[in-house]
Amino acid sequence: MRISSLTYFTASLSGMQENQSQIARLGEQIGSGQRMLAARDDPLSAEKAMQLSSRVAVREQYLANQQKAGLALNYENTVLKEMEKTLTDVRALVVQSNGSDTQPLRDQHAAMLKNMYLHFKDLANNRDTEGHYIFAGFNTNLDSATPPFQHTQVYPTGPSASGTYSGTPDGALLSSQGVRSITVDDGRSVQVTDNLENVIKFSSPVDINGVNTTDMLQALDQIAITLSDSSLTTAQVNTAVNNAANALTDTLGRLGNVQRRVAATTVEVNDITKTTENLVLLEKNALSDLTLVDKAAAIVEMQSRQTSLEAAQRAYAQTSKLSLFSYL
């Protein structure tokens, strides 16, 4: 079968152009690192890549929320532990106080309780890393002049008045406890703050030397006032001390319930975070397999095509010189 010169030259030229086009495409893939330079290159893979990219973006947003929730819980847990330590120290000091102690010793204990009161009050009105009151419920924008737990210390004179709470009341609308939550997964939220109104507030008044105290701040202030009052009898001081110690025990129990809630939620968030991180990693790997080029294989293919192109160009150049006139 005879092949005309025109047919040969046309086929050779088409083959060289195709090789040049593939070499250029491989160069772009190697330079960009992307296997698909346009959706038309592989429509099915492009659609899968878009779906994976969307899922990765959603999971990464959830991952950011999980990390934010973990930070909030760890911060609250730190404050709660310090509150527990403070109240435990207060209770130990109150228990060792006695109406038969010398007045200088009672005054010393009262002065210590005064400072413990201030520390506990600061903890109750603590702010998170964003400047929001941790235990204010939804009222996160209270200014420094209006903290959630307010009480005026009157030690060493008395009697002490009840404190007030300016945060979201326990049982308020939108939440049964006036707390905040963060969405950490599809249809899944976790509580990241607690309302301490019913931790600091007593379920029923506690009598401390004739004063019906209604909250822990008032009780701490009043027991300090009682210890510093030299006119009271041993029996009066002991009764006040016992009532205050019982109130502290009850408060520590309620505080412990909050701490257990925070600990359980922290474990939950950590588990969700690990799962999300693993899913993000798997989906990113799958996305890479779909979109990223194998540079080593692409370089080998490009070199092979360059070699083939150079051979075809040399053959074309040699063949194009042939003519019957060369043999006449």
Image (spheres, grey):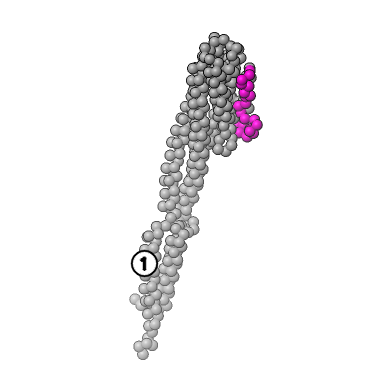
Residue sitting at 57 percent across and 32 percent down? 126
Q: Using the image, determine if residue 138 lies above or below residue 239.
A: below
Q: Using the image, determine if residue 128 lies above or below residue 208.
A: below
The spot of residue 110 in percent (x, y) is 56, 20
Residue linked to disc 1: 304
The spot of residue 76 in percent (x, y) is 52, 32
View extreme (bottom): residue: 328
Question: What span is colored magenta in the figure?
Answer: 137-158
Q: Using the image, determine if residue 292 lies above or below residue 71.
A: below
| Magenta residue check for 327 | no
| Magenta residue check for 138 | yes
Q: Is residue 123 left or right of residue 274?
A: right
Q: Amino acid at mark 1?
A: Ser
Q: Quadrant of residue 137?
A: top right
Q: Is residue 171 left or right of residue 21?
A: right
Residue sitting at 61 percent across and 14 percent down? 211
Q: Quadrant of residue 14?
A: bottom left
Q: Using the image, determine if residue 316 lies above or below residue 105.
A: below
View extreme (left): residue: 1
Residues 76 and 83: in front is 83
Q: Main secondary structure of the magenta part?
A: loop
Residue sitting at 48 percent across and 20 percent down? 92
Q: Quarter of the image containing the N terminus?
A: bottom left
Residue sitting at 51 percent across and 22 percent down? 90
The spot of residue 50 in percent (x, y) is 49, 50
Neighbours of disc 1 within 10 Å: few (<14), some (14-19), many (20+)? few
The spot of residue 202 in percent (x, y) is 57, 19
Q: In this orientation, does residue 291 appear?
A: yes
Secondary structure found at label 1: helix
